[in-house]
Image: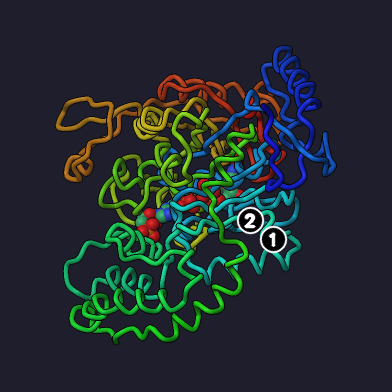
Amino acid sequence: MPIKAPFLGPYRLQGFFCVFFLACGLAAKSDPTFDSGAYYQGRSGFFGGSGQLYYSEAFMSNLAVLGTQWGDEGKGKIVDLLTNLADVVVRFQGGNNAGHTLVVGDQTYALHLVPSGILHPEKTAVIASGVVVDPDVLLKEIDELTQRGVTITPGNLKISEKAHIILPHHKTLDQARESGGTGPALKIGTTGRGIGPAYEDKAARRGLRLGDLRDLDYFREKLILGLAEKNCLFTSLYGLPAADPEPVVQAARTWAERLLPFITDTFRVIRQAADGGFNLLFEGAQGVQLDIDHGTYPFVTSSNPTAGAVAVGAGLAPRDLNSVLGLVKAYTSRVGEGPFPTELLDQTGHLIREVGREYGTTTGRPRRCGWLDAVVVRAAVELCGVDSLAVTKLDILKGLPELKIAKSYLLNGQEIDYVPAALKDLDLVEPVYETFPGFDQDISAAKTLSDLPDNARRYLDRLTELVGAPLGLVSVGPERGQTIVLREFFR
Ligand code: GDP
Ligand code: IMO
Ligand code: MG
């Protein structure tokens, strides 16, 4: 039976939707490139209006967009593009260590916490319980976006009451550890945003959650308890002054006043949307090799940017995730410390960084660059059930005389096809490359695969063979329109 979904704002009638997708299906049959126009124009473009909406389960299709490498694969651009045909866009892990850049016409937006779907005011954006939230950063982001004309209201942004708060002392601890002041501590090269310490407190069951802002006496009590332990570390280990809880309690009043209207039970929002047959888009942050369980530990972040975390971090039954789009940058980049087998420390690496503008969206740090690593991407395909690939930044490779893809590694003279877990092995592996002729043509206006030079297509074909997943789209520039869409992502 159809379910009424009043909380989702203005939506279109499903009957028209059927006709639309039938048309798209026919278009897809007659042309190997799927009707990308739909993604640029969106659902409201076809069915604009604010009628009462009823959807049935038959149309449910939920998609996760995940980074397959070490982050910065272009997730923001692709989520913004696909939001046109989604109804609800959900961030489910990470925090403001993420930096997702969106280019729309002459405007560039750098988002850290607010889901990249926010530029579409008629859609619902959700920050779910798996995210750690720095309230000051979130409020600043909301204010800056609002000043630039983006609509953000409790109607279109829902924030989980269960999401943990990044408190000022989490940032202090993160930065104190990274500064190396206590001797030979491991430097991870974190973003310094307090992500690790906030997740630590969550796992230690002493974190504060956004819902705790409803009761500031309780908030104060728990804050003081938590600080008792942190202040021991600050004063005796790091030579820092003890942190004073009172300014934080003061700040929490502002957080409560401004954020409580947005704070809700997002599990219900997501559940109702899934049951109502609305299209859910899950926006990953970071990438699989930064996953705390499956990445290049300990040089990882403190959450799981993998498909399994969609269920946990958003509160979605695993069976409700229908499809996973794996984002693959046409080469590899990494920010911070840690192993990177295909890193290029030569002129080619420098060239890729400059042409690709590989500087961190969050910290401005230069990103380390290297050849595409099919071993890494294959691991993501297997671990996340990636059913199609979005290859981004192919345009950046233009002009390189030859291109390389690592198909396997050599470890102590033996060929292996997986990323070893032990750091000492990862330091020893040597990539086994396949080499391809490069391409000179400007591809930034390509609309179909056949617009690409043969050498670019050969590179893509071999990539898909090596990693075991087909192409879903190819991105040839930062703008929405610079995308070749090859499949339907939402039914
Ligand atoms: P994310 O963290 O995965 O969202 O990626 P970032 O936004 O940190 O980094 C990707 C950068 O590449 C951004 O500046 C995007 O605007 C840009 N970008 C995305 N796709 C393309 C593309 O296909 N070509 C080019 N030239 N730039 C792109
Ligand atoms: P997006 O979503 C690239 C890296 C940091 C560091 C490690 C741990 O933009 O792809 P943390 O602050 O999370 O404790 O740092 O993880 N890192 C990222 N690298 N893109 C990101 O996000 C990242 N988020 C964290 O550089 O090496
Ligand atoms: Mg980024």
- How many residues crowd mark 2 within 10 Å: few (<14), some (14–19), many (20+)? many
Question: Split into 4 quadrants, where in the image is the N terminus?
Answer: top right
User: Which residue is located at x 35 percent, y 74 percent?
Assistant: 222
The vertical placement of 411 against 396, above or below, is above
Q: What residue would you read off at disc 2? A: 157
Residue farthest along the left direction in this orientation? 412
Viewer-side residue, 17 vs 188: 17
> Considering the numbered disc 1 on the image, is that residue within a helix, a strand or a loop?
loop
The structure residue drawn at horizontal position 52% and vertical position 37%, both measured from the top left corner, is 64
Q: Which residue is mark 1?
A: 153
Taking 277 as reference, is 203 above or below it?
A: below
Amino acid type of the residue tagged 2 in the rendering:
Leu
Q: Residues within 10 Å of mark 1 (few under 14, many from 20)?
A: some
Instruction: Determine contact: label 2, label 1, CB under 8 Å.
Output: yes
In this picture, residue 13 sits left or right of residue 119: right
Q: Is residue 475 visible to us here?
A: yes
Q: Nearer the viewer, residue 185 or 253?
A: 253
| Image quadrant containing the C terminus | top right
Q: Residue at x 40, y 37 (%)?
A: 308
Q: Quadrant of residue 429?
A: top left
